[in-house]
Image (cartoon, rainbow, N blue to C red):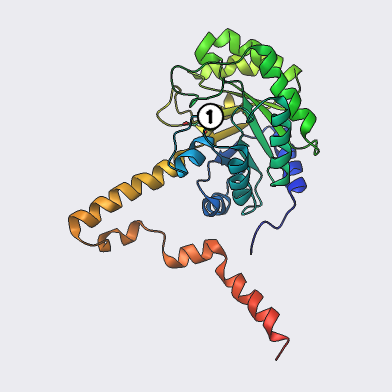
Amino acid sequence: MLYTTTTAADRRATLRAELASGRLLRFPGAFNPLSARLIEAKGFDGVYISGAVLSADLGLPDIGLTTATEVTQRAGQIARMTNLPAIVDADTGFGEPMNVARTVQGLEDAGLAGCHIEDQVNPKRCGHLDGKSVVDEETALQRIRAAVDGRRDPNFLVMARTDIRAVDGLAAAVDRAKALVDAGADAIFPEAMASASEFEAIREAVDVPLLANMTEFGKGELLTAQQLTDLGMNIVIYPVTLLRLAMGAAMAGLDEITAEGTQAGLLDRMQTRAELYDLLDYASYNHFDADVFNFRL
Ligand SMILES: C[C@](O)(C(=O)O)[C@H](CC(=O)O)C(=O)O
Ligand SMILES: [Mg+2]
């Protein structure tokens, strides 16, 4: 009830231990706090909070319009609904190095287990679109140093994302990944890898955990969990998958209401009232009320 039942420090320690296990951790993207509960109920390892989803949720494109405050608040709402570790997309860190440090502290306070900070020029783009640009190496490293320096919990995972592959090629991505690790990054998110062999090249270059982004309609092949495990990946995100599925279902549902004049034919594709209440842990709230008020009787 009211979730979570663990502390943020516990969830960060769990994530660190899980990463050390070498097992591939699967982090679907939650499009709201409720869907984080579903991700946990279905047995996944963590919850990802996507900048693309957060922007789309507000009806905005993912071009750096959201603020640190908005992202921190929404990420906190999602993180507090699950006992799984939650990792958030912190885009470029929302400013200069000192802003990055402050962003990280806000995310710690909001109960996140970690975040990734990327080396795109602001205004940023989706990593799978053309026309991105990246900052020079020194600026990229400063962002990571600031994030590491800013955190108070050493278990808060500072992940460096590099978008350089699509701009300067794979060799540049390998070099940048190494430099980001030297700057203190706990993990690397090599964005827009075109193939399995590109993930392999990054795996050979650095020893820290690696994140694979399995976003749909992007530049890369959708690799299976087994393939990613074999490639030595440590975290896989499905950042926009649940939003795309939900919106696909909503589109079809609205069309059916228009065509049929009723939603009656859609019931078997819906989460039922009982299933929703189960996910909400409704019964516990009733018990809580009963326990609190009973002593008066
Ligand atoms: C991972 C990502 O940064 C996100 O915000 O979820 C996006 C996903 C997407 O737009 O498909 C990305 O830049 O890859
Ligand atoms: Mg993003």
Choose between 297 and 201: the one closer to the eye: 297
List x then y, in percent, for residue 93.
Answer: 64, 30
Element at label 1: strand
Tally the marks.
1
List x then y, in percent, for residue 200.
Answer: 58, 17
Residue identified by numbered label 1: 213
List x then y, in percent, for residue 214.
Answer: 49, 31
Q: In which quarter of the image is the N terminus?
A: bottom right
Q: In which quarter of the image is the C terminus?
A: bottom right
List x then y, in percent, for residue 180.
Answer: 70, 18
**Which residue occupies 55% across, 11% down?**
170
Instruction: Check the image and name the residue furthest to the bottom.
Output: 297
Toward which corner of the image does residue 244 lie, by quadrant?
top left
Amino acid marked by disc 1: Asn
Q: In this view, does 159 lie to the left or right of 274?
A: right
Q: Is residue 163 left or right of residue 3?
A: left
Q: Is residue 171 left or right of residue 18?
A: left
63 over 47 or under it: above or below: above
Residue 197 appears in the figure = yes
**Which residue occupies 55% across, 35% down?**
237
Q: Is mark 1 within 8 Å of ligand 1?
A: yes
243 over 102 or under it: above or below: below
Q: In this view, does 74 lie to the left or right of 253?
A: right
Label 1 Cα neighbours within 10 Å, binned few <14 / some 14-19 / many ≥20: many
209 over 72 or under it: above or below: above
Toward which corner of the image does residue 270 lie, by quadrant?
bottom left
Toward which corner of the image does residue 118 lie, by quadrant?
top right
Residue 207 appears in the figure = no
**Which residue occupies 45% across, 16% down?**
131
